[in-house]
Image (cartoon, helix red, strand yellow):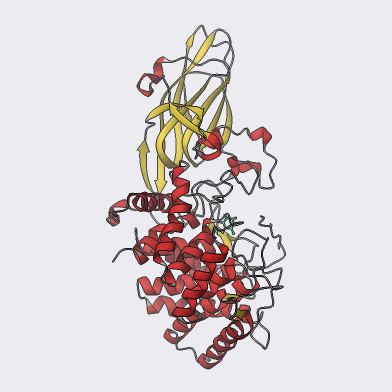
Amino acid sequence: MAFTFQINSDVEFIHDEKLLRKAEENRPEIRKEKVLPSRIVEMVSDPSSLNGISVRTSEKEISKLPSYGWKRDDRLILDFGDHRVGSFEMEVDQTGSPMDAPLFLRLKFAEVPAELAAEASDYDGWLSRSWIQEEFIHLDKLPAKVSLPRRYSFRYVELKVIDTSPKWQAVFSNPSVITETSADGSSFTPLRLEDEKMQRIYDVGIKTLADCMQDVFEDGPKRDRRLWLGDLRLQALADYASFDNTALVKRCLYLFAGMTTKEGKISANVFVNPKNIPDDTFLFEYSLFFISVLYDLHQAHPDEELVKELYPTAKKQMDLSLQMFDEEGRLIPDENYPVFVDWSNEFNKDTAGQAEMIYVLKQFLALARIAEEPEMEFYLRKLELISGYAKEKLYRKDRKLFVTGDEEFNIASQVWMVLAGVMSFEENQEIMRTVVREMFPVTGIATPYMYHHIVEALFEAGLVEEAVCLMKNYWGKMIDLGADTFWEAFDPNVPEYSPYGSPIVNSYCHAWSCTPVYLIKKYLVK
Ligand code: RAM
């Protein structure tokens, strides 16, 4: 499985100051709260936890922390009780003889216990090692206050004394985190569900969403800490079902609309620090999903003015992508503008991409009507052509499945065609029944992003029981393995799988995995 970097540093971008000012006007307030650790823990091996590592309460008590002295190679793990995003501080002093050498300390921040067991020096993955949440500091004088300037995403903080001197020990006290989020917990009443497992899945989904809600909807507060359009689409849906922070969605839409390429293409993600910068990465459907986010926002909170204002950007994405279809209505994939669908590159994505276009084109038509699009007929014909190609050339009646590439039948094609509503409800149901029969248990998929779409397609096809079962087997399994927030990558068949070869760069609180919040509210609450 892989996701490849794109380097398109020669692409020129525009900065539309008017739209970017609106992004600024919708900048959220960051709420802060001081949180103290609940206990001191130690690592234990536990086959039922992720990577076989868990923690248990230490004999050392958190209330007595200032009375303990720590010497060379001593380690202490603070447990902050739940996943936290924020800045860390503590006081450090010494005990014993005079301080005849500096204190050399390593601080390690971990979202899950598995990270505590991994050593940064062993990391050899393709993703930057600079993501590893680890600091080395020297303190020449004690007492001192340590206030680290970075924002971390963690539940556990490991303090490792690299050295004091044989004459004295380090003393730690008052560790705390000042948490940061733009989610306002008082803005809604969380759902109460009868099914305990589903309740837990829902609660962890809410926590995941809240911790990703920062100055923008970040994909992950540990990594990549930026706004990705594909993640935004799902976060916004979960947001309407919970915190309902519409301003934050608008801010994100304005950021994307305000920084397109010269030809009008939206990049897959943007940075907002130290200033607004679009990334030179482009994904076919991520650009198109600008339309979906605008459409979904209008469904949740009708706003014709906003639709009209952002319609030209939406239309540009549609026009650029339509150029990738031939006269028969078939998607001609372009490796410089790849269809994403999932991280895996082990399956053909052409039919899924075709379906994504149909899915978005339908939403686009709804926006076009509001914007009084003069070329309505043109887009209606395109929808007919592209859907027609899917039905006539890609659907295999005998198999009750869509084909892709070279006679390949994969789950992504079926799921996206069902979501696009290409066939009738009855046919969709038949397709998803075939999927359950022939393609379950799902293999080779490690993103909650793809699992979300599988579950949604099951719900859309009326297969509620199967959808709930998959949610329990997927998100529920993360919880069984100890998740406080849902992960960026998880293959239930290979729980220890990391796309980067080490858990220390995995993101264990990742936006695209928060969707049970939306799925449960939309499909299970009457
Ligand atoms: C990774 C991130 C992000 C996702 C992209 C495509 O970099 O996990 O969330 O949208 O892949």
Q: Residue at x 72, y 65 (%)?
A: 10
Q: Position of residue 36 (x, y in %)?
A: 37, 32
| Residue pictured at 49% horizontal, 79% vertical | 427
| Residue appearing at x 64%, y 34% in the figure | 120
Residue lying at 45% horizontally and 79% vertically, measured from the top left: 426
Percent of width and height locating residue 95: 47, 11
Does residue 374 sit above or below 174 in this rendering? Answer: below
Would you say 444 lies left or right of 217 here?
right
110 vs 56: above or below: below
Q: Position of residue 299 (x, y in %)?
A: 38, 74
**Between residues 521 and 227, which one lies in front from this camera angle?**
521
Q: Quadrant of ligand 1?
A: bottom right
Image height of 237 relative to 120, above or below: below
Return the x and y of residue 373 as percentages of the image width and height: 49, 88
- Report if residue 291 is visible in the image: no
Depth check: give the residue in front, 403 or 44.
403
Query: Dividing the image into 4 quarters, which one contains the N terminus?
Result: bottom right
Of residue 8 and residue 384, the one placed in the foreground of this image is 384
Quadrant of image for the C terminus: bottom left
